[in-house]
Amino acid sequence: MKAMILAAGRGERMRPLTDTCPKPLLEVGGTPLIGWHLHRLAAAGITEVVINHAWLGAMIEERLGDGSAYGVRIQYSAEDVALETAGGIAKALPLLGDEPFLLISADIFTDFDLHRLLAYAKTMDQNHVAHLVMVPNPEYHPLGDFALENGLIVPNGAEKYCYGNLAICRAGLLADVVLGEKAKLGPMLAKYAAEGRVSGEYFEGTWVNVGTPADLQQADTLVREGNGKLLGV
């Protein structure tokens, strides 16, 4: 299986730190935020990784290189202008192939067991376009994104959770995206969820959306207090 790490965002809420450094390279416990994902992907046996980038993307390529330092092989999907989540994935599809791939945002920090997604991917048929990891609603997003009923994601429901920016996806999820145009992933997920084609699971472990300097400090503290053992690397 291949993995795609979304790393093209500008990181507006993290400014001024991201004025001169792309957010994925901000350090947590002495390691770039994106580096934690690379280590954990390698530990799970996922060694083929695609990373998209836009803002200060050359710095990402220079820092991570071919990925050998992390035990992976990286291919880059450069965007002149950030194409949003769905647009960025659609552009990178030629590098990802036709099989299900793991999708993760560079700016989350979590100890979710990636082996679980590897196992789930083996059960997905062609009609099944995505499997999402849902998490408790953070303070900045109290209404959540989707409900989870009997293992399926539904656009509306009695209790909604937050999409944790971690998933298994098929290329069919991006069928409606016009190549080269900006497009968000949320509407695609909602469309196919309404058709019963998106599954999900609920996760209550460590999960931080590193969007602000305070979030970065929280993640850094978690690593330093756990001596790096938190994420199993």
Image (tube, rainbow, N blue to C red):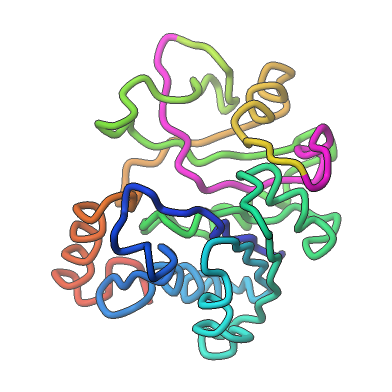
Examine the structure image and report whether residue 160 is included in the region drawn in magenta. Answer: yes
Residue shown at the point (40%, 24%) measured from the top left: 144
Task: Tell me where residue 178 appears, x and y as whole percent.
Answer: 83, 38
Q: Is residue 126 left or right of residue 162?
A: right
Pick the residue in front: 233 or 172.
Answer: 172
Pick the residue in front: 19 or 159.
Answer: 19
Residue 85 falls in image quadrant? top right
Residue 27 falls in image quadrant? bottom left
Pick the residue in front: 147 or 18.
Answer: 18
Residue shown at the point (66%, 81%) measured from the top left: 73
Task: Tell me where residue 192 appears, x and y as whole percent.
Answer: 72, 25
Task: Tell me where residue 218 appears, x and y as whole percent.
Answer: 19, 57
Count the labels in the image. Answer: 0
Pick the residue in front: 93 or 19.
Answer: 19
Q: Is residue 6 left or right of residue 172?
A: left
Residue shown at the point (23%, 69%) measured from the top left: 223
Q: Quadrant of the N terminus?
A: bottom right
Magenta residues? 158-180
Examine the structure image and report whether residue 113 is included in the region drawn in magenta. Answer: no
Q: Is residue 27 left or right of residue 157?
A: left
Residue shown at the point (80%, 46%) measured from the top left: 171
Q: Quadrant of the C terminus?
A: bottom left
Task: Tell me where residue 181 appears, x and y as whole percent.
Answer: 75, 41
